[in-house]
C-alpha cells in the first residue's frame, strides 16, 4: 500500500509540473521585462517595449522602434495626453493588474490609429512569449499579438 501511495504521489507531482503554464524554477512568471513586439498582420518586429510595475500595476513603454524611418515619429492620432508625444518613451500600456491569475483590467494604445483598447496579457512557453489581447467591450471582439521576451 505504501508503495502505491508513493507511486501515485510521484505521478501526481510529475503531471502537475508538466502542465502547460506550470512554473518551472528559473522561468519568468511575470511579464515584467523587455519585449519585442511582433505585428499580427505582417509578422515583423515593430518595437521594443519595456513592461514595468508601478504601485502594483503593470505599464508598458516603447523603448525603441525597430521600423526604419520611425525615429522621431509622434503620436499624431492620439486623442488623450499622449497626443503629439514622441513614440520612443510613450506609455502604451497602462494599469494592468493581476486578478485571479490573469493580467487584465488595463488598456493599450495603438499609436498607428490613436485608439485605446481594453487589454489583457497571458504568458506562454515558460514566459518566453506574451500574448497581448486588445479588445472593445468583451475579449471576443479584439485581436491578439504575440510578443517575444528580450530580457
Image (cartoon, grey):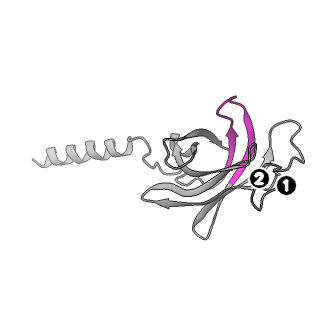
Residue 39 is left or right of residue 85, and the answer is left
Residue 2 is left or right of residue 60, and the answer is left
Residue 57: image location, x then y, percent = 59, 64
Q: Give the range drawn in magenta.
A: 34-50
Label 1: state its secondary structure: loop
Residue located 44% across and 56% down the image: 101
Q: Which of marks 1 and 2 is nearer the N terminus?
A: 2
Q: Mark 1 points at which residue?
A: 84
Q: In this view, does 79 lie above or below 64?
A: below
Residue 28 is left or right of residue 35, and the answer is left
Q: Mark 2 points at which residue?
A: 78
In the image, 56 versus 28, the foreground residue is: 56
Determine the CA span between mark 1 and mark 2. Answer: 7 Å
Residue 66: image location, x then y, percent = 80, 39
Q: In which quarter of the image is residue 19?
A: top left
Residue 100: image location, x then y, percent = 42, 59
Amino acid at each position: 500500500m505504501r508503495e502505491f501511495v508513493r507511486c501515485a504521489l510521484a505521478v501526481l507531482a510529475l503531471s502537475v509540473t508538466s502542465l502547460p503554464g506550470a512554473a518551472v524554477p528559473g522561468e519568468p512568471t511575470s511579464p515584467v521585462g523587455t519585449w519585442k513586439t511582433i505585428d499580427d498582420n505582417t509578422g515583423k518586429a515593430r518595437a521594443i517595449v519595456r513592461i514595468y510595475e508601478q504601485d502594483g500595476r503593470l505599464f508598458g513603454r516603447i523603448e525603441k522602434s525597430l521600423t526604419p524611418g520611425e525615429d522621431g515619429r509622434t503620436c499624431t492620432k492620439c486623442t488623450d495626453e499622449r497626443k503629439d508625444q514622441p513614440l520612443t518613451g510613450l506609455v502604451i500600456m497602462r494599469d494592468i493588474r493581476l486578478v485571479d491569475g490573469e493580467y487584465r483590467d488595463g488598456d493599450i494604445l495603438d499609436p498607428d490609429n490613436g485608439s485605446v483598447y481594453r487589454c489583457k496579457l497571458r504568458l506562454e512557453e515558460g514566459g518566453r512569449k506574451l500574448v497581448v489581447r486588445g479588445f472593445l467591450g468583451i475579449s471576443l471582439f479584439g485581436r491578439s499579438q504575440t510578443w517575444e521576451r528580450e530580457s
